[in-house]
Amino acid sequence: MSKIGFIGIGLMGQPMSARLLAADYDLMIWNRSVEKCLPLAELGAAIADSPEVIAQHCDVICLCLTDTIAVEAVFSQLQPHLKSGQVILDFSSIDPLATQKLANHCSTIGVDWIDCPVSGGVQGAASGTLAMMAGGRLEAIDKLKPLLANLSSRLTYMGASGSGQYTKICNQMLVSCQALVIAEVVAFAESAGVNSQLLAEAFSGGFADSKPLQILAPEMAERRFTPEKWHVKTLLKDLDMAVDHSRIVRSSTPMSGLAAQLMRLHAVAGYSDKDPSTLVNLYLEPHE
């Protein structure tokens, strides 16, 4: 069995790594804050001293990092130690053009770069039911399917390098706009004297139903903002990418543009590291 490296033990990386350990993969991990690695070490993971060590010892190197800058920084540490035949499997949500540049560089040394961002949140990571959207060389992705089956309920091949990242941007456009309108609906219902805690039940199975609705509407109605399962800053990052790339591909994204500005207002008000369920406060705080 291949030795697997996993870099980035955060909200998503921790449960994903735990599932690989439960499936008996030989796992080596690294995180900038080493204390986040300790629970996984108790489950059998080896802790690397640096990304370089992972590059030297692992066949498949998984990344689950915050943003493009973080991925590029880690790659600069991996690069001198990479060998032909290795695969970098990037679960991060980053800029598609940066992904294509990294993939092209890797191809010159016989390394496959697979962009494979995920959707499903911490709950999906813990239960192994993430939706994955992959871009890169199809043959390399096919070889990864047994590993990815431990983490996902659906893996969709989207096309060439960068396609997975563009698909994730589309996913985040939908999720972010839904989160904002759910917050608006909860606040509107309460202002109209409607019990907002019944909205998710009332809409269940109808055209307005969705996973974000069933998760966020009860949390917003109950002001249940912890534990944080994802962050406002993450949605803002992805909305900004959507707006930036809409100019590049010449596609209009007015809804996502407005969503980005509303998300930014919320982030600068002190909610950047908070759960998106706090978006309801955009509409409630002036009245409460």
Image (cartoon, helix red, strand yellow):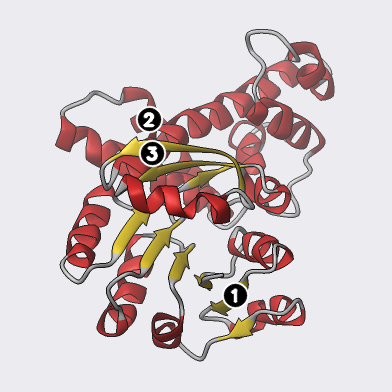
Between the residue at mark 3 and the residue at mark 1, the CA separation in whole angstroms equals 29 Å
Q: Which residue bears the numbered disc 1?
A: 27
Locate residue 202, reporting x and y percent: 79, 12
Q: Quadrant of the N terminus?
A: bottom right
Q: Which residue bears the numbered disc 3?
A: 169
Question: Quick one: label 2, few (<14), some, or many (20+) residues within 10 Å?
Answer: many
Between the residue at mark 3 and the residue at mark 2, the CA separation in whole angstroms equals 10 Å
* Residue depicted at x 63% and y 65%: 17
Element under label 1?
Answer: strand
Between the residue at mark 2 and the residue at mark 1, the CA separation in whole angstroms equals 38 Å
Give the total number of marks visible in the rendering. Answer: 3
In the displayed structure, would residue 17 be above or below residue 208?
below
Image depth: mark 2 or mark 1 in front: 1
Of label 2 and label 1, which has the lower sequence position?
Answer: 1
Task: Give the image quarter of residue 259.
Answer: top left
User: What kind of residue is marked 3?
Assistant: Ile
